[in-house]
Image (cartoon, rainbow, N blue to C red):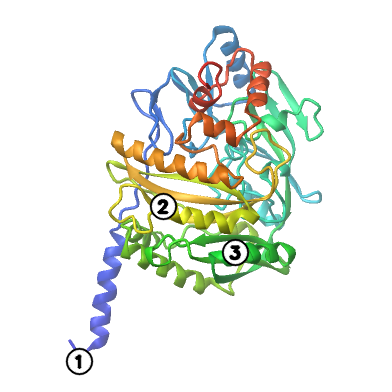
């Protein structure tokens, strides 16, 4: 065998291929069960509901809303249900599944707009507009979510030039809580957009929206390694230099370089646009999952995972990619279905000029080596969130950096309590630095922390009761943090 190294090489490649091929690609099970028990992506807040209704057309939806006002039952709205705090269902309520309302209604190539129903996914929109050389202005880095869902949670993305997602909506058709169908524009004196976007489905049903588009630019990927104390200056220079369209960064959570090293991924204009490059599909799922599963163990294996990411980031430096393909990151490899454990997201926002001190203080709060801990931090991604002047419950009253955190912990009562304590301490630290946290995730934060993070909550509550006097639209998030009598 030593005389035939090619044969040994074939055996090694075959062996590794078999290992990779047999890595299971799980799908987390959530939604509606046969016993009418509803959950969302984490499964942490199961609740029995009355039924799920597929949204067939506007007339049926209007009839259901009017019936709910007359008969007193409660309505929740669901798309892909990737929010994680009970935002898409309510005890004994009716869930409207919006995914069947997924039509692309109009593409205006000259004015660079698209009108689309709220149940369509961003992928549906990309498939429709790419042949015209057009691209989305703002969306998440993944294209799997619905338009209505993303707007309802006031999502943001990697673009650093166009501001918040809500700011790209020119017009929407809304079914109000009292059963009226109205057209809402930006200059609407009743300010429906202010409460519907980032309103978590509590102010009616988004039926369709007219979105601003931009060119499907071609970018050169530019990656750089840096220390966390360098990032504030680095990012400011990036913003001042208009050659970069999109950007995000990762922070090390590996023990050897914990919160000390970062790498930045930038997408620089080439001056070219594209109509011909196909939309990319998910690639390398099993290899990515193997690397992530190694990192999930913590300790030295987390160091190994960080090193593998470093090599990957270095390998894409200098490559080109279209704007639409930047907004199609892989997601399947992140699925996690280990019994007795859960992976959740949290996102904390801090002012840009507070980032360095915030990371220093965070280093004192968290364990650098969590291999023996129940509470594990797997990944921190940094994204820019521009000041939001559009929505009521906004997380960016000034320009912010958002730290998207992937966390794992156990499902025993004490393990959940332990995770809640750490995250509440983390939230307190964020508030001390003038920051806030993102609301679409599991409700680890206290009601007091919610009120401090979102000082306009009372105005939001008052508008809810005024516009939805029978409180037809409800969910577990509203019931816990905002409903009168429960919010105290």
Please tell me whether mark 2 sits on a helix, a strand or a loop: loop
Q: Which residue is mark 2?
A: 366
Please tell me whether mark 3 sits on a helix, a strand or a loop: helix
Labels in figure, total:
3
| Nearest-to-viewer mark from 3 and 1 | 3
Expressed as whole percent of the image width and height from the top left, the position of residue 354 reads 61, 54
Residue in the picture at 41% in, 66% down:
306
Q: Is residue 372 left or right of residue 306?
A: left
Expressed as whole percent of the image width and height from the top left, the position of residue 13 reads 29, 74
Mark with earlier residue (3, 1): 1
On screen, residue 182 above or below 247: above
Residue, far top: 70
Q: Nearer the viewer, residue 431 or 21?
A: 431
Q: Residues within 10 Å of mark 1 (few under 14, many from 20)?
A: few
Mark with earlier residue (1, 2): 1
Q: Which residue is mark 1?
A: 3
On screen, residue 482 above or below 102: above
Asked where in the image residue 240 lies, by quadrant, the reply is bottom right
Q: Which residue is mark 3?
A: 231
Q: Nearer the viewer, residue 330 or 418?
A: 418
Q: Residues within 10 Å of mark 3 (few under 14, many from 20)?
A: many
Q: Marks 3 and 1, Cα distance to the nearest angstrom? A: 52 Å
Q: Residues within 10 Å of mark 2 (few under 14, many from 20)?
A: some
Q: Nearer the viewer, residue 361 or 22?
A: 361
């Amino acid at each position: 065998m030593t005389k035939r190294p090619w044969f040994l090489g074939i055996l090694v490649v075959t062996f590794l291929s078999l290992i990779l091929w047999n890595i299971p690609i799980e799908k987390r099970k959530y939604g509606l069960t046969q016993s009418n028990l509803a959950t969302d992506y984490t499964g942490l807040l199961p609740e029995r509901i009355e039924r799920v209704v597929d949204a067939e057309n506007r007339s049926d939806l209007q009839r259901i809303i009017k019936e709910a006002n007359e008969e007193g039952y409660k309505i929740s709205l669901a798309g892909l249900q990737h929010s994680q705090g009970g935002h898409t269902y309510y005890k004994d309520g009716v869930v409207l599944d919006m995914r069947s309302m997924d039509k692309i209604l109009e593409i205006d190539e000259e004015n660079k707009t698209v009108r689309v129903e709220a149940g369509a996914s961003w992928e549906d929109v990309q498939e429709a507009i790419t042949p015209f050389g057009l691209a989305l202005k703002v969306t998440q880095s993944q294209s799997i979510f619905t338009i209505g869902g993303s707007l309802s949670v006031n999502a943001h993305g990697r673009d650093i030039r166009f501001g918040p997602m809500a700011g790209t909506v020119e017009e929407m058709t809304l079914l109000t809580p009292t059963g009226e169908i109205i057209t809402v524009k930006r200059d609407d004196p009743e300010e429906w957009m202010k409460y519907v976007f980032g309103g978590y489905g509590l102010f009616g049903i988004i039926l369709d929206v007219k979105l601003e588009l931009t060119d499907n630019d071609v970018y050169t990927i530019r990656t750089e390694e840096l220390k966390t104390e360098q990032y504030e200056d680095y990012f400011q220079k990036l913003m001042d230099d208009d050659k970069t369209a999109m950007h995000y960064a990762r922070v090390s959570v590996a023990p050897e370089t914990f919160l000390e090293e970062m790498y930045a991924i930038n997408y620089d204009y080439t001056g070219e646009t594209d109509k011909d490059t196909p939309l990319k599909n998910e690639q390398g799922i099993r290899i990515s999952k193997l690397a992530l599963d190694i990192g999930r163990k913590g300790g030295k294996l987390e160091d190994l995972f960080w090193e593998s990411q470093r090599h990957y980031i270095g390998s894409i430096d200098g490559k080109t990619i279209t704007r639409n393909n930047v907004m199609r990151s892989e997601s399947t490899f992140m699925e996690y279905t280990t019994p007795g454990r859960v992976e959740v997201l949290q996102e904390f926002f801090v002012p840009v000029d507070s980032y360095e001190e915030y990371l220093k203080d965070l280093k004192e709060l968290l364990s650098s080596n969590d291999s023996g801990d129940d509470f594990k931090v797997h990944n921190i991604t940094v994204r820019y969130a521009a000041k939001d002047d559009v929505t009521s419950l906004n997380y960016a009253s000034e320009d912010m950096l958002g730290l998207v955190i992937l966390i794992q912990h156990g499902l025993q009562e004490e393990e959940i309590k332990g995770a809640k304590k750490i995250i509440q301490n983390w939230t307190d630290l964020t508030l001390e630095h003038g920051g806030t946290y993102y609301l679409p995730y599991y409700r680890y934060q206290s009601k007091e922390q919610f009120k401090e993070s979102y000082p306009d909550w009372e105005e939001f509550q008052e508008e809810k009761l005024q516009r939805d006097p029978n409180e037809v639209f409800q969910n577990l998030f509203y019931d816990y943090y905002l409903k009168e009598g429960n919010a105290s």
